[in-house]
Amino acid sequence: MTDETTYHVDCGTLLTGDGETIEDARVLVTADRVETVGTQEDVPEVGDRVDHSGETVLPGLIDAHLHLQGSRTMDPMDWVTESTALGTARATADLRSLLSAGFTSVRDVGSTTGLGLRDAVAAGEIPGPRIYTSGQAISQTGGHGDSHSLPHEWVVDTGIGISTLADGADECRKEARKRVRDGVDCLKIMTTGGVLSERDAPDQSQFTDREVQALVEEAHRVGIPVASHAQGTAGVERALENGVDTIEHGFYLEDRTLELFVQTDATFVPTMAIMHRIVEYGADHGVPEHGLRKAREAYEAHVDSITRAHEAGVAIATGTDFLGPALVPHGENALELELLVEEIGFDEQAAIEAATGVAARTVPGDDVGVLEAGRYADFVVADDPLSDVGSLREPVAVYKGGKRVEL
């Protein structure tokens, strides 16, 4: 097919990604976009027929929180000492795995490689999902994104790692402007400590109100959304009160925190998959002892917070926080949907929507996540994900921009 070809896809069941299910459906595709969607009675047969009449078709999946750093160990010190060139080469392989697994869009929230990979994929030079990237995240000194064991001047002077440092509102504003200058799709900040950082904790808030305000103001001024790594209550609320668009992780959410989510219409990206893998298998994969301890301490509260957020009607999007090592490899990202069903009580359709229409809220534009006229013709074919969301682990077919992906 040429880029100008129009063809139609006959579907047994079509999930549009925004709550609608159509039986005996048809999708009309022209070039890389959806032209129309409806029943086979309502949508005409134009061009070649692609037969998925015995299967379920759904929008391409979105992982709204991962890192394209090409990491292959769970030791954070390796992440800052390995070369960017090696990481980029490995991440190129990770992109193939993501696309083959049905993830046609990803949000890279902290890497030194994301901008180059994004542009190479967009130019058709390497295969991969659509990449929306923050470039390097922004952390306070001594915060979650700092390399605590290294001399401070090394971190500042070399710019190593998935974050750069900023302190005070003026520095935060300048660092945000640097990201805008780089052409990022979103801004990633840290408003609490974390699991894998050495000398802070998930319940410790980071950045002041004025600092968060400066970061958000600069991003929103040019239409860029802001994501905050925020695990403890105080840091989550500080982010929400100052206009952050998405909260990543959210281990400890109180009732007033959930009310803030609803009031601000923010999106929650809980990243259950990495916590599950660290708690279950992290000791066998080189996760530092401090990371194992903090993950185990937070896990039950994390599950409870996600469950209550779901019951409160908070918009929840799928994100794995996968990095590339054997413990959290790109390509197994559908685990997040399975955990939403098994641990939180989502039904299969709600889990799929968390990975499609809801996850699309986390990226700029209105091009992905839903199968409707004008959006990209990104879709996945599966056997029966409404009965078993785990079937998405082995998609029958994947299409990106109207073209079938070689699995």
Image: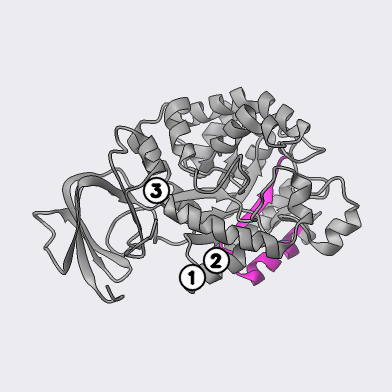
Q: Is residue 361 above or below residue 221?
A: above
| Residue depicted at 40% across the width and 60% down the height | 366
Q: State the CA–CA distance, disc 2 to disc 1.
A: 6 Å
Q: Is residue 28 above or below residue 268?
A: below
Determine if the magenta segment contains residue 179: yes
Residue beneath disc 2: 118
Disc 1 crowd, CA 10 A, few/some/many (<14, 14-19, 20+): some
**Residue 148, position as x, y percentages in the image:** 84, 45
Q: Is residue 191 visible?
A: yes
Disc 3 crowd, CA 10 A, few/some/many (<14, 14-19, 20+): many
| Residue depicted at 91% across the width and 52% down the height | 151
Q: Earlier in the sequence, mark 3 or mark 1?
A: 1
Q: Secondary structure at mark 2?
A: helix
Q: Locate residue 174 relative to residue 134 in the image: left or right.
A: right
Residue beneath disc 1: 122
**Residue 91, position as x, y percentages in the image:** 60, 58
| Residue depicted at 72% across the width and 37% down the height | 286
Q: Nearer the viewer, mark 3 or mark 1?
A: 1
Residue bounds of the magenta highlight: 172-192
**Residue 374, position as x, y percentages in the image:** 30, 65
